[in-house]
Each structure stands twice: as C-alpha cells, then as structure tokens.
Image: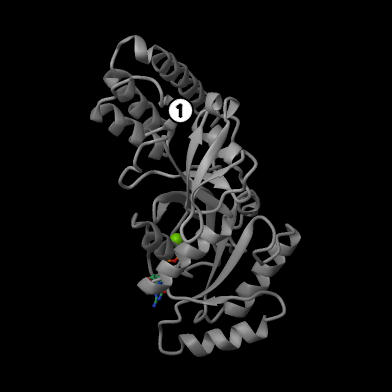
C-alpha cells in the first residue's frame, strides 16, 4: 500500500488496494489509466478520502494529457523511434542471422520472427523482459549490414541505455562483419564497453555448436584490444538467465520498496525503480510529491545490515532496500 495515505481513516477495500498495486506495476500509460479508473471506482466515497479522491482525479488528468501527447508524437518522431517503457531500453543489434531475434525471444518469452536466413527482421520490435520483479524493454532490430543499413540504426543505439551487440562466431563472414561494425560504432563514437552510455555488451553467439567454442576463442583473441566479448548461446537457458542479471546491472538502477508506518510489507510488493545513488528523498518523491514535501525521516530495512534504522532524507538507498516514510 502506498504510505502517503497513512493517518487517513480511509478503510480502503481489497479491490482498491489490488487496483493500486496494478497501477504501481503498470508499464504502459494505457494500463495505468485502466488501473487508476478502477481505483477511482472502488475508493470508498466519504469525507476521509476526499483528498485522495481529488488526488486520483489529478493523476488521471495528467495521464490523459500524457496519452494525448504520445498519440500526437508519431508525426514528429521518426518511425524507428521506440517509446521507452519499463526500467530501461536495451537495443539488440548485430550482423545478419547472428541470432538477435532468437535471443530476444528467449529473454522476453515473446516470440519474434526467427529464421535461418539473413534480413528476417525489418523494423524495430520492442518486447518487455522480466527481471525478478521489474520489466526492462528490449528492442529487436534489423541487421547491421552494408546492403541495407539506414542511418537511424546507429542513432537508435546511441540514444538507448544499453545495447547487446550479437555476432555469430561460426559465420564465415565474421571478420568482415566485425570490421564493419567496429567502423560504424567508432564513426558514431560509441565505445564497445560498459563504461559510458549506451553501455555495450558484445556477445559471441552460437557457441553451443561443435566448433563454436574454438571459433569464439580465435575471434576473442584477435580483437582483445578492441572489446571483450562474452561466449554465449541464445538457446542455452543458463546463459539467458545470466544475461538478464547482467542487463539489470548495466542499467545502474535500484529497486526500493515502501511500506506504511505500522503496517506489514505486502506479499510480492512492487518496487519503485530509481537511479543508483538515489536518496530517501528521491524515493518519497517517486511515491508522491506531497510526501516528499512533508518528509521528516524514514526507517530503513536492508538485508544483513539495517533493521528499521532511522535515516535522514539524504541517506542513499541500495537495491532491495525497504523504507517506511514518515511525513
Ligand atoms: N545453434 C544456435 N543457433 C542459433 C542461436 N541463436 C540463433 N540461432 C539460429 O540462427 C538463425 C538466425 O536466428 P535469428 O534470431 O533469426 O537471427 P537474426 O540475427 O535475428 O537475423 P536477422 O533478423 O535476419 O538479422 C536461426 O536459424 C536460429 O535458430 C544459438 O545460440 N545457437
Ligand atoms: Mg531478426
């Protein structure tokens, strides 16, 4: 339950709390609007909830404005532009037939068009990847290939939070493909590392094949001065699971859970996703701006260290922190 309504004798119903939970975990504006409508319908209508009702109305009008803005943007935005959703945007790119769509399908469990011939994917295709209790947006893209390259393909990578650059280590054209991609990335000043944004992970895919490991070794040694690829197989579940965690690490975000003073934590609470380095104040802001304005202190629970310790508004939060905000 959102903690800012603590102190109001609201008698919120389970239906309302369910809808509120759905609102918090909603990724798209349409889902948020739907959950908020449900909250407005199920909130007990009495004096004690007047402020909350007004607040819901205000949020609804804000969301509708956002939805209208989004609707009117395609005219100004290029067709390749993929609206950011979830905790971050990660572009899956690389030469033809390297396994980008296969990788995306296995990461997101949303089937993409996978085929044993090049140039299968023609336009950017977003899908959400679940990592534990959050969602990260992955975007499948057409191949980086001289024959079809369009300038937006690099622009799209440049504006993303991160990119997975996928090569097929068994492709007879691997060296030409590598040279070509290195040239494209250096022209756009995108380093092949995880130090700056977009953060780039290079994958040597299809190492599950008989000569895959050897081919990977030769290739990785040849280019060791330029980038550090990971040996990978898009069809290996443990590689996929490790990559999910690596992608989460790339985004430099923390998940923060909140609870109302005196209340127990809900089952499967939905976290707020904040930037690494965020403080108690930033978390309060994410819950509600009134809460941030009136914030006095918070109590913090952190596995293995804090157990309800009183902390100040400037206290930095870590991934998986639980806080109780006192306003
Ligand atoms: N053995 C093996 N085959 C793979 C792997 N990943 C993809 N493939 C196969 O490689 C072929 C191409 O896969 P796609 O995912 O369509 O490749 P793509 O990079 O999306 O291709 P384009 O969209 O044409 O650029 C398919 O036949 C896949 O089944 C892998 O890790 N191992
Ligand atoms: Mg594809």
Residue 101: horizontal and vertical position, in percent?
42, 61
Of 202 and 121, which appears nearest the observer? 202
| Location of residue 115 with respect to 204 vertically, above or below | above
In the depicted view, which residue is nearer to us: 325 or 16? Answer: 325
Up-down relation of residue 157 to residue 78 (above or below): below
Number of marks present in the image shown: 1
Between 163 and 76, the residue placed more toward the observer is: 163
Identify the residue at horizontal 54%, vertical 76% (top origin): 230
Q: Secondary structure at mark 1?
A: helix
Q: Which residue is mark 1?
A: 4
Q: Residue 70 at what x, y percent from top left?
A: 51, 29
Q: Quadrant of ligand 2?
A: bottom left
Can you see residue 127? no
For this view, does 194 lie left or right of residue 324? right
Some atom of ligand 2 lies within 8 Å of the CB belonging to the residue at label 1: no
The reply, left or right, for residue 110 in relation to residue 325 is left
Across and down, in percent, residue 185 comes to 69, 62
Please give the name of the residue rendered at 39% of the width and 20% of the height, measured from the top-left corner: 8
State the colouring used for the structure image.
Answer: one colour
Residue at the left extreme of this rendering? 14
Q: List x then y, in percent, for residue 76.
A: 60, 30
Q: Is 210 left or right of 75, judged from the image as shown?
A: left
Instruction: Determine crowd level at label 1: few under 14, some 14-19, many 20+ residues with C-alpha closer than 10 A.
Output: many
Q: Which of 45 and 238 lies nearest the eye of the viewer?
A: 45
Instruction: Check the image and report above or below for 261 versus 88.
Output: above
Which quadrant does the N terminus fall into?
Answer: top left
Residue 256 in sight: yes
């Amino acid at each position: 339950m959102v903690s800012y309504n603590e102190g109001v004798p609201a008698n919120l119903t389970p239906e309302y709390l369910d809808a509120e939970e759905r609102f918090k975990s909603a990724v798209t504006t349409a889902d948020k609007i739907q959950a908020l409508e449900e909250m407005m319908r199920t909130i007990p209508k009495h004096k004690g909830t007047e402020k909350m009702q007004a607040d819901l109305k205000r949020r609804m009008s804000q969301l509708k404005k956002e939805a209208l803005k989004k609707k009117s943007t395609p005219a100004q935005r290029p067709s390749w532009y993929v609206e950011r959703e979830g905790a971050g945007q990660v572009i899956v790119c690389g030469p033809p037939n390297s396994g980008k769509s296969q990788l995306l399908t296995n990461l997101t469990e949303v089937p993409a068009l996978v085929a044993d011939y090049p140039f299968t994917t023609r336009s950017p295709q977003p899908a959400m990847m679940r990592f534990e209790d959050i969602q990260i947006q992955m975007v499948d893209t057409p191949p980086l290939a001289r024959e079809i390259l369009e300038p937006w393909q690099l622009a799209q990578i440049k504006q993303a939070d991160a990119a997975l650059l996928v090569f097929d280590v068994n492709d007879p054209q691997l060296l030409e493909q590598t040279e070509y991609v290195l040239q494209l990335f250096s022209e756009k000043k995108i380093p092949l590392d995880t130090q700056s944004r977009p953060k780039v992970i290079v994958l040597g895919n299809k190492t599950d094949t008989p000569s895959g490991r050897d081919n990977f070794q030769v290739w990785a040694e040849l280019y060791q001065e330029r980038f550090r690829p990971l040996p990978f197989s898009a069809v290996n579940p443990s590689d996929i699971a490790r990559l999910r965690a690596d992608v989460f690490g790339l985004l430099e975000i923390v998940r923060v859970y909140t609870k109302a003073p005196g209340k127990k934590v809900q089952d499967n609470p939905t976290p707020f996703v904040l930037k690494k380095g965020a403080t108690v104040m930033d978390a309060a802001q994410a819950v509600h701006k009134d809460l941030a304005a009136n914030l006095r202190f918070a109590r913090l629970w952190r596995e293995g260290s804090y157990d309800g310790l009183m902390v100040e508004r400037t206290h930095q939060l870590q991934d998986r922190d639980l806080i109780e905000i006192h306003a």
